[in-house]
């Protein structure tokens, strides 16, 4: 199958939107942004064996490639609109492409995102997506807006994806619920939108909670105190790991794609209401303080330092 046939296969299935003046097929797409809104642009690449385990199902790769990008828009409180897709494929495999599109376009349709262009080349398996979203001026949530006295919150639960990867790499069976968090992250788009005007700073948790909140501290010129025992965990994670390993997955594991955000402590009720309206659980996990980094504390007040242990040691049977 030639490059043109692959592109035609993509074009036939790509969604439509009224504001796409010209989509796949010309040298570039023509888009009509609504007046009075800012364009929000993000790009993320997924490489085989780095951002997803080798052998991941094509539909899961497709889903995740878009999901991680939508997560960046969610963290900015942007409404997704359009995307482009650069595919580097070892062979022109129509079956693989169809599976990939199943996952990619299911998520695109759910968020009314139109695939308007891209690039298709031969090379090692790699998927790069650019998403374009819209936000009203001044409404975007940024990393540099945390203030001393804010409460720190996180959506959903943390650590499932990291535990799944650790189990996989250790050769252990991976519970389906944990594997799903690794392969099919759910971008918190509705929550991000609901937090606009309520939260101060926001970031999506892709590299691990401590690392990502560290970016908020750097950008905002503040410190953060976290309560280790407050970090939310799924039942599946609690069943798979415990103790230090559990906390390490939650605090330092990657691929969560939850939103971590700060908001004035007086707005706790408004934050809970916004989260309830978005259908996502949120947990208050700490406070913004004067300082410059993220520190985590146990219930007894002792500072907790995540141990420098590898993922392979996380499983309690290891
Ligand atoms: P050019 O050589 O002019 O860059 P291409 O042959 O790369 O054109 O692309 C032809 C059309 O197909 C363009 O509209 C491009 O955006 C689209 N396209 C190519 N690859 C993809 C892809 N992976 N996903 C979506 N659209 C694609
Ligand atoms: Mg091209």
Image (spheres, grey):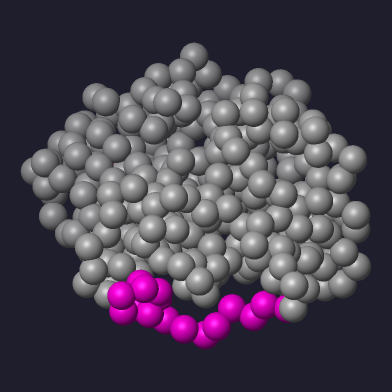
- Quadrant (top left, top right, bottom left, bottom right) of the C terminus: bottom left
In front of the other: 119 or 189: 189
Q: Position of residue 89 (x, y in %)?
A: 22, 55
The image shows residue 18, relative to residue 47, as above or below, that is above
Query: Which residue is at the far bottom?
Result: 308
Query: Residue 40 magenta-drawn?
Result: no
Q: Position of residue 308 (x, y in %)?
A: 52, 85
At x 55% / y 39%, what residue is drawn? 188
Question: In the visual, does 19 lie left or right of 109?
Answer: right
In front of the other: 256 or 77: 256
Question: In the visual, does 312 lie left or right of 22?
Answer: left
Query: Which residue is at the far left?
Result: 1
* Image quadrant where residue 271 sits: top right
At x 75% / y 53%, what residue is drawn? 152
Q: Main secondary structure of the magenta part?
A: loop
At x 71% / y 63%, what residue is drawn? 227
Question: In the visual, does 26 lie left or right of 284?
Answer: left
* Image quadrant where residue 167 sits: bottom left
Please give the range of residues in magenta. Answer: 303-318
Query: Which residue is at the far front?
Result: 300
Query: Residue 308 magenta-drawn?
Result: yes
Q: Is residue 58 visible?
A: yes
The image shows residue 177, relative to residue 273, as above or below, that is below
Q: Position of residue 193 (x, y in %)?
A: 66, 31
The image shows residue 22, relative to residue 3, as above or below, that is above
């Amino acid at each position: 199958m030639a490059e043109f046939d692959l592109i035609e296969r993509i074009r036939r299935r790509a969604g439509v939107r009224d504001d796409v003046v010209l989509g796949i097929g010309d040298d570039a797409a023509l888009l009509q942004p609504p007046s009075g809104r800012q364009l929000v642009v993000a790009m993320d690449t997924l490489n085989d064996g780095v951002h997803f385990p080798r052998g991941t199902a094509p539909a899961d790769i497709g889903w995740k490639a878009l999901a991680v990008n939508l997560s960046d828009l969610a963290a900015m409180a942007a409404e997704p609109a359009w995307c482009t897709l650069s595919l580097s494929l070892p062979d022109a495999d129509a079956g693989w492409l169809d599976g990939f599109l199943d996952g990619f376009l299911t998520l695109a349709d759910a968020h009314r995102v139109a695939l308007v262009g891209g690039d298709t080349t031969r090379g090692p398996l790699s998927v790069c997506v650019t998403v374009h979203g819209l936000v009203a001026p001044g409404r975007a949530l940024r990393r540099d807006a945390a203030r001393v006295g804010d409460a720190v919150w996180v959506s959903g639960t943390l650590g499932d994806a990291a535990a799944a990867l650790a189990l996989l790499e250790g050769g252990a069976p991976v519970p389906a619920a944990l594997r799903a968090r690794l392969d099919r992250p759910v971008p918190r788009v509705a929550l991000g939108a609901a937090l606009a005007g309520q939260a101060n700073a926001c970031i999506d948790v892709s590299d691990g909670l401590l690392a990502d909140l560290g970016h908020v501290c750097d950008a905002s010129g503040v410190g953060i105190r976290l309560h280790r025992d407050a970090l939310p965990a799924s039942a599946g994670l609690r069943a798979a790991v415990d103790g230090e390993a559990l906390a390490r997955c939650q605090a330092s594991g990657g691929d969560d794609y939850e939103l971590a955000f700060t908001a004035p402590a007086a707005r706790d009720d408004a934050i809970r209401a916004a989260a309830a309206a978005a259908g996502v659980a949120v947990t208050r996990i700490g406070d913004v303080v004067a300082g410059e980094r993220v520190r985590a504390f146990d219930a007894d007040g002792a500072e907790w330092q995540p141990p420098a242990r590898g993922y392979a040691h996380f499983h309690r049977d290891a």
